[in-house]
Image: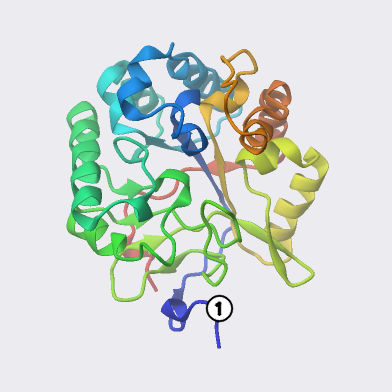
Amino acid sequence: MPAFPFFNHFAPIHSAVIQNYLTVDVEDYYQVSAFEPLVGLTKWDQYSSRVVKNTRTILRALDRHHAKATFFVLGWTGERYPDVVREIIAMGHPIGCHSYQHRLIYTLSPNEFREDTRRAKDVLEEITGKPVLGYRAPSYSITRQSLWAYGILEDLGFEFSSSVFPIYHDRYGMPGAPRFRFKVPGHDIIEYPISTARFLGRNIPVSGGGYFRIFPYQFTKTALLRINKRENHPFVFFIHPWEIDPEQPKMKHASPLSRFRHYTNLDRTHGRLQRLLTDFAFIPIPERQKNLVS
């Protein structure tokens, strides 16, 4: 029996051309889920923001390498820094929704999730002047406890999500989910899972975030090439603006595990990103999905 029965009859979607999807989760260093017990939404305005500067650094890197990405923006951030959202659009990158206040979906009621998501979508659409069709859950928190979120996303007009991480993790993960793009059963929405490589029968996270910083770059490159060349699939890669910023203020009272995950190799990430952009070609996740469903 499959590890997660919801996906017994998922509809795989295959692409004849390998093109990898680059995604940027536009959030600040103090907004990550690991620091939520220390820095709730009501305290965010008390911290010095670095998200605009760091996002612009990523934009310059993408421009140098002629790469495009989907930028999933927090509604709270877009509301306060609309100019950087306009800059992202002006440089040819689509905007997706990353919630309003970065709360884990499975800690919310369906009504709370609907209102948070609607608020963020409205903010971003007001700035961009166009529909926002893509969604990424805070900390990949569409899990077996929060599959109901897909119905709400569909109701709100989203065409795709990139919110499932098919691994075991203490905060997120859905190991029984498909590893590649699929149509969500019972819905028209398309899911782009965060990419994993298969080693010894297990899914290994190799597609961004702390894994990109902690694992040696050559390991990451080899694993991503394996997805492209052996499995003939694109991979979905993610990065946060704060990950290229080793000078960000430190959360001294965070747990040792959270500090390790958050601060390891921040001084190497920008260089590794440059290598990644040299070694692979990237495009955004397509905004319109209906012509991609087979």
Identity of the residue drawn at 28% across and 18% down = 80
Assess disc 1: are there few (<14), some (14-19) or many (≥20) residues with their C-alpha within 10 Å of its C-alpha. Answer: few
Determine the residue located farthest toward the bottom in the rendered image: 1
Identity of the residue drawn at 50% across and 58% down = 193
How many numbered tags mark residues here? 1
99 is higher (above) or lower (below) than 152: above
Q: Position of residue 224 (x, y in %)?
A: 70, 52
Left or right: residue 80 versus residue 182 is: left
Disc 1, SS = loop
Taking the image as drawn, is residue 28 in sight?
no
Quarter holding the N terminus?
bottom right
Give amino acid for label 1: Ala
Identity of the residue drawn at 78% across and 39% down = 217
Q: Which residue is mark 1?
A: 3
109 is higher (above) or lower (below) than 74: below
Q: Nearer the viewer, residue 17 or 203?
A: 203
